[in-house]
Amino acid sequence: EPEVTQTPSHQVTQMGQEVILRCVPISNHLYFYWYRQILGQKVEFLVSFYNNEISEKSEIFDDQFSVERPDGSNFTLKIRSTKLEDSAMYFCASSDRASGGGTLHFGNGTRLTVT
Amino acid sequence: AQSVTQLGSHVSVSEGALVLLRCNYSSSVPPYLFWYVQYPNQGLQLLLKYTTGATLVKGINGFEAEFKKSETSFHLTKPSAHMSDAAEYFCAALNYNQGGKLIFGQGTELSVKP
């Protein structure tokens, strides 16, 4: 069964550094998402992306965050200058439809630790 | 705004016992509803979902959930727990007009005792 893959599985970075989290969505999916889960808290929506632009973003997704689909397969989340509070598990997801009938398929996540 | 509440951050059952994980949503317009499972060091895997139609939804691994509009609930059940069911379970809601913006509950960790 096709799956969403994320790399790396664990990223450690120093405060103020830039990080790029990478995702390869399922190949025929057109809708892409990032979610995050701070330890002990709920999984939170960050951003949705379709047709090479952001469809919706949460208030968490400020100017320090950006997303890109640089080629036909990768979908990346960049954090420009990491803060301690960015430490979390980041999940990429993809879907073949935007509507509620479409199922989001999640990757295994990247655990980001900011020191 | 939509919110999802899961009662009990940790549920422990004996192997073979009934599993019941509770989920309530807040909106007056019923959303689409989902249960995801997360095994250690893995991603979120869809167990089942309710969109329209039959209110009792069957999923993978013997789980099922019933949508009850009058109770704004979508509780997850399994008649007989197996050791391999030990994992974190997340209930999530999706409003019709909000694409893939899932609203998650806080999760329930299920432990299964031999």
Image: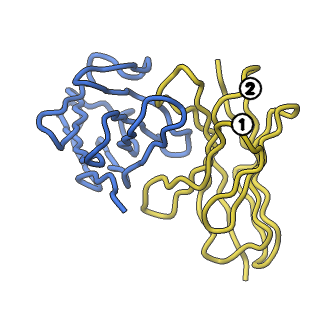
The quarter holding residue A5 reads bottom left
Q: Residues within 10 Å of mark 2 (few under 14, many from 20)?
A: some
Whether A37 is drawn above or below B109: the answer is above
Q: Quadrant of the N terminus of chain A?
A: bottom left
Q: What is the distance, in whole Å, between disc 1 and disc 2 at their CAs? A: 8 Å
Q: Chain of mark 2?
A: B
Q: From the viewer's perspective, is B93 left or right of B54?
A: left
Q: Position of residue B66 (x, y in %)?
A: 78, 48
Indicate the secondary structure of the residue bearing disc 1: strand
Residue identified by numbered label 2:
B26
Whether A45 is drawn above or below B62: the answer is above
Q: From the viewer's perspective, is B103 left or right of A51?
A: right
Residue identified by numbered label 1:
B5
- The type of colouring in the image is by chain
Q: Do the dots labelled 1 and 2 sit on one chain?
A: yes
Indicate the secondary structure of the residue bearing disc 2: loop
> Marks 1 and 2: CB-CB under 8 Å?
yes
Q: Amino acid at mark 2?
A: Ser
Whether A58 is drawn above or below A8: the answer is above
Which chain is rendered yellow in the image? Answer: B
Q: From the viewer's perspective, is B45 left or right of B51?
A: left
